[in-house]
Image: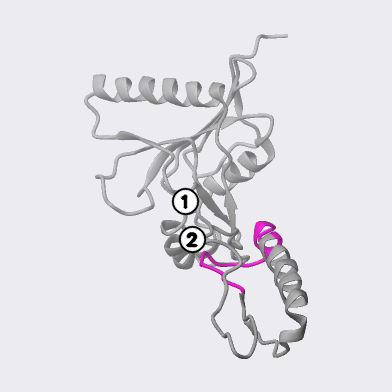
Amino acid sequence: MTLRIYSDRHQHQIVSLRRSLCSWWREHIRLGGFDAIAEYEFLLTRGARDTRPQRCYSRRMVALRKRTPTRMTLDEFLAWAAANSGNWQLIDGEPVAMAPGSDAHGAIQSEVGALLRNHLLEQRSACRVVTEPGIVPRVRANRNYRVPDLGVTCAPPSDAPMVAEPILLIEILSPSNEADTRANIWAYTSIPSVHEILAIRSTRIEAELLVRGADGSWPAEPDIIGRMAR
């Protein structure tokens, strides 16, 4: 955008206007008024006989807030997530950022993963533990991509963003994410290969275990592990 002012008689007004507009421009950028990462320059001229543009601020790249798309298919999400930082899930077509876990959450995740790995090694199992595996539920598969804390699969490793044929999925329940995590758990029940789902509480020694029955159905209530008998 170029603003041309042809009157030399009002040069001091031009300078004042330029400063005001530059100040507004900087503030607009600071508040994230644009949806791209680019170098924004607001060009003003000094008059008809001096058309050299002036920058509002020094030449540099400015990182601006990018608007998250509101709806995506699974393929669109995977391409988008690969180009963006952070961890994301796709929930019914909407990208949702995953908040970093607490210290307790990370400690439980690490310890449970190590116990599972050691157990599988002792059993000489071909199965393996995967941290934060990408999971696609069977229901609305083209609109969902979930990320549990841990998973176990017997499928060979691959470069795919999704883990194939998970048999055990584990979530760690934190007070801030319990509702969202339980929604993920019910999505996992739609995956034919999943036989067990374990939800571990981070605030007390307790876990909930769902085991698929021989007929393929899931129990109405999970088994509670670790809770003291009342």
Q: CA distance from mark 2 to mark 1?
A: 18 Å
Q: Main secondary structure of the magenta part?
A: loop
Instruction: Report helix, strand or loop for mark 1.
Output: loop
The residue identified by callout 1 is 85
**Category of crowding for the residue at label 1, using alpha-carbon neighbours closer than 10 angstroms: few (below 14), some (14–19), many (at least 20):** few
Find residue 134 and report its horizontal and vertical position in percent: 43, 48
Instruction: Report helix, strand or loop for mark 2.
Output: loop
Res 220 visible? yes
Q: What residue do we see at 44% from left, 60% from top? A: 78
Q: What residue do we see at 26% from left, 50% from top? A: 158
Find residue 165 and report its horizontal and vertical position in percent: 37, 47
Pointer 2 and pointer 1: residues touching (CB < 8 Å)? no
Colour scheme:
one colour
Examine the rendered structure and indicate whether residue 70 appears above or below residue 44. Answer: above
Q: Is residue 34 covered in magenta?
A: yes
Give, as a single range, the part of the protein colored magenta: 27-42
In the figure, is residue 201 to the left or right of 215? right
Quadrant in which residue 42 is drawn: bottom right
Examine the rendered structure and indicate whether residue 217 appears above or below residue 92. Answer: above
